[in-house]
């Protein structure tokens, strides 16, 4: 075979190259001794070893249930788990399943919520279709959309989340351009958003459902509500989900995960959607894996059934509250005297969003990032990764990406690591002030 024969990859492969998550992981490996305020991992010491062992022992104390767990499962997920997830949702929403308009047939269990995001993107988006997102938003989902060839259009935000006037203006602009039929979805991380820590206000949750319905003239515009952090609430108000304002379930698709609230190693997430959307997801998932890991589902079912879950969540909340306060206090100590530096005080989740003066860029190639990694041995997520690039616009037409933000996480480091990481970061930033 000639050496000139090149590999011709699909367009999806081309669209998915150079994703930032891979670069961040590489930096962590190649720079030992670096304190990571970047990795969105959970607290190592709080992983539920004893509770998971108890669930495992319970599951394997009976050969019948053990064999069920060791066998293939179903594409939609174990019925026993989906029934428990239905109860879990009614507990979180403080509404009955009938009031929410949800049955077990509206639930699909996935390998973490990330798989649900990916499957939903696959069944909804053709190249050139449009997703509206907050600015900033979860950068890994931006990579999913990019890999599908979708257009990603940012909508302005403030301290109460996505601005509804900006959303309306964006939809109005797309209609005037004849692009409204290509709008498939509005994506929102409604509680303690990754990366900003901001939550969508309750009045806007109701409004966004009304807006999506109003503009669904030629085809349905879905709202994808990503609730990965909803249970990690420390001192903020508990607000009903966007999904709770859509009792028909025809507009809002909800997804959650147990990776942040219990264990990422189990890799269990789920989504709630209309039966029509669920059928499409099941068909795609059936081609991919026949169903997510059956063993993990049965372990989690025992965890929920035997009341091992909610006490763990309460414990986690005390752990992360202390860590959040540690990071905020360290930021106050080391950054408060730097003009133009400010940060969000999140009421939940795992992230603090810090803004520097506009003259200081934070990207991978910036002098700040290089100094932080190589000299001061600390790592963060550059905020510019969390802003969408609209593939439907030329370079000169692109909205300006904000390049002076950092996403800092308090999830994985202990208190000393958080304090030292913020101190090191302040040393890096100070040298560019």
Image: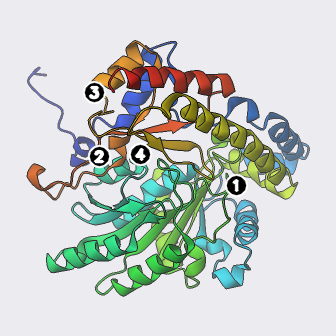
CA–CA distance between discs 1 and 3?
A: 35 Å
Q: Is residue 48 among the parts visible in the rendering?
A: yes
Q: Is residue 254 left or right of residue 57?
A: left
Looking at the picture, does residue 66 appear above or below residue 81?
Answer: above
Which-is-in-front pick, marks 4 and 2? 2
Which labelled disc corresponds to residue 235?
Answer: 1
Name the residue that disc number 2 marks. 402
Q: Secondary structure at mark 2?
A: loop
CA–CA distance between discs 4 and 1?
A: 27 Å
Which residue is found at the position 43% from the left and 50% from the top?
138
Q: Is residue 24 left or right of residue 33?
A: left
Q: Secondary structure at mark 1?
A: loop
CA–CA distance between discs 4 and 2?
A: 18 Å
Tell me where residue 235 sits by quadrant.
bottom right
Q: Secondary structure at mark 3?
A: loop
Q: Secondary structure at mark 4?
A: helix
């Amino acid at each position: 075979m000639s050496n000139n024969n090149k590999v011709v990859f699909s367009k999806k492969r081309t669209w998915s190259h150079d994703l930032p998550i891979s670069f961040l992981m590489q930096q962590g490996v190649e720079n030992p001794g670096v304190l990571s305020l970047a990795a969105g991992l959970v607290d190592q010491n709080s992983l539920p070893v004893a509770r998971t062992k108890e669930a495992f022992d319970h599951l394997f104390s009976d050969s019948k249930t053990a064999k069920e767990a060791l066998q293939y499962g179903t594409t939609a997920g174990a019925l026993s788990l989906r029934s428990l997830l239905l109860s879990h949702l009614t507990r979180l929403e403080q509404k009955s399943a009938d009031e929410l308009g949800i049955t077990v047939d509206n639930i699909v269990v996935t390998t973490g919520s990330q798989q649900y995001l990916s499957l939903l993107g696959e069944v909804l988006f053709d190249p050139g279709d449009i997703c509206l997102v907050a600015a900033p938003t979860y950068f890994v989902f931006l990579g999913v959309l990019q890999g599908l060839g979708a257009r990603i259009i940012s909508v302005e935000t403030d301290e109460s989340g996505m601005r509804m006037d900006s959303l309306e203006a964006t939809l109005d602009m797309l209609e005037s351009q004849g692009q409204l039929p290509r709008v498939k979805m509005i994506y929102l991380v409604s509680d303690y958003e990754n990366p900003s820590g901001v939550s969508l206000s309750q009045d806007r949750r109701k409004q966004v459902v009304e807006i999506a319905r109003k503009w669904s003239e030629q085809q349905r515009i879905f709202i994808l509500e990503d609730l990965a952090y909803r249970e990690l609430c420390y001192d903020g108000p508990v607000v009903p989900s966007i999904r709770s304002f859509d009792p028909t379930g025809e507009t809002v698709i909800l997804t959650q995960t147990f990776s942040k609230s219990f264990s990422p190693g189990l890799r269990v997430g789920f989504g709630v959607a209309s039966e029509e959307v669920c059928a499409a997801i099941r068909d795609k998932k059936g081609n991919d894996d026949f169903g997510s890991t059956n063993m993990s589902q049965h372990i989690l079912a025992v965890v929920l059934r035997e009341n091992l879950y909610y006490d763990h969540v309460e414990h986690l909340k005390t752990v992360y509250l202390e860590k959040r306060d540690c990071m905020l206090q360290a930021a106050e100590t080391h950054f408060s005297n730097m003009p133009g530096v400010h940060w969000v005080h999140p009421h939940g989740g795992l992230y603090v969003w810090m803004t520097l003066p506009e003259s200081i860029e934070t990207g991978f190639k910036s002098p700040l990032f290089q100094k932080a990694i190589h000299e001061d041995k600390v790592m963060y997520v550059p905020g510019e990764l969390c802003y969408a690039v609209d593939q439907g616009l030329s370079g000169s037409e692109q909205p300006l990406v904000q390049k002076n933000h950092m996403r800092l996480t308090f999830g994985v480091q202990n208190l000393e690591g958080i304090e030292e990481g913020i101190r090191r970061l302040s040393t890096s930033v100070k040298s560019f002030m």
